[in-house]
Image (cartoon, rainbow, N blue to C red):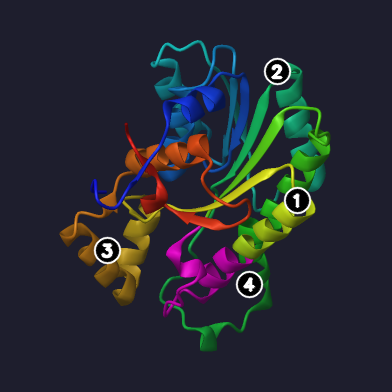
Amino acid sequence: MTEATCRRGSSENEAAFWGKRFLIVVTGASGGIGRGIAVSFAERVAKESLLVITGRNTARLEETERMISALGRDVNVSVETCDHSKASFRDYQDLLGRASARLPDPETVVLVHNAATVGNCSDYVVSYDDEKTIDDYYRLNLTSVMTLTAAFLRCYDSDLGPTRTIVNISSSTAIRPTRGLGLYCTGKAAREMYMRVVATENPSVIVCSYDPGTVDTAMSKQTREGNEECSTRIQNAKKSGRYLTPEVTANLLIRILEHGNFRSGERVVYTDAPCVS
């Protein structure tokens, strides 16, 4: 991001955002963008804040925990092994209940919906003939987002309580149809519209759908190897210097959140991040 394309932020906004105890839940934090977001928050939050990191792979979550602990910032971490393709609303209530017991008086609570799968990235829509495959895909990539959000809003249901923020990790495919990614495109588009409804119904909740750009993750490798159109996009991103690491795009998200220069519910792109002053 160049000086000509980024926006200036203010140190006052940063201080107002970070000078509080945070309780942060990040789904899909065992690697990639989710891990980057968890570590980026841990680098900045106040002492005694709590990071709840979720995912299916306990060993990789514990690796994320070790990375956070190595920062030496007196931030607590709760590892929650959770298969979001199977978790129920009650499971999410229990997860948030455990988090609230560890940090009963947060000043800011943040929910980051990062967990997602791309599906079979070479299947065209004419092949979508198995209802269970479709249902299973949306169970993880859409339904779990809805039920976890509902549990979060019920757990923190007062405008007089902590400041509430919900982040949906989106994609350019939410607004850009891509051959072979019918499930992924529609899932991301549905999540964005759902977040707009969340913002409309809950005007005191800060809601952000974040397009992280083209990022070097296991998912991008999967799409690069299985989808010609995606492979071309990734190669173009590399040539133009816009193939980001998870750490870089996570830090750009953090800057967008701390400056708050977006309309709640709307999509923001990594290039919207303010410049470092």
Relative to the observer, which residue lies in front, 54 or 104? 104
Type of amino acid at the residue the image marks with label 3: Ile
x and y, in percent, of residue 236 in the image: 21, 66
Q: Which is nearer the N-term, disc 2 or disc 1?
A: 2
Mark 4, Cα crowd under 10 Å, few <14 / some 14-19 / many 20+, is: few
Residue 30 in sight: no
Q: Mark 1 points at which residue?
A: 147
Type of amino acid at the residue the image marks with label 2: Leu
**Magenta-highlighted residues:** 170-190
Q: Name the residue under label 3.
A: 234
Relative to the observer, which residue lies in front, 271 or 133? 271
User: Residue drawn at (30%, 65%), measured in percent from left and top?
Assistant: 224
Q: Which mark is residue 134?
A: 4
Marks 1/3: CA–CA distance: 33 Å
Q: Is residue 105 above or below residue 94?
A: above
Marks 2/3: CA–CA distance: 41 Å
Marks 1/4: CA–CA distance: 18 Å
Was residue 92 drawn as part of the magenta stretch in this picture? Answer: no
Mark 2, Cα crowd under 10 Å, few <14 / some 14-19 / many 20+, is: some
255 sits left or right of 138 in the view = left
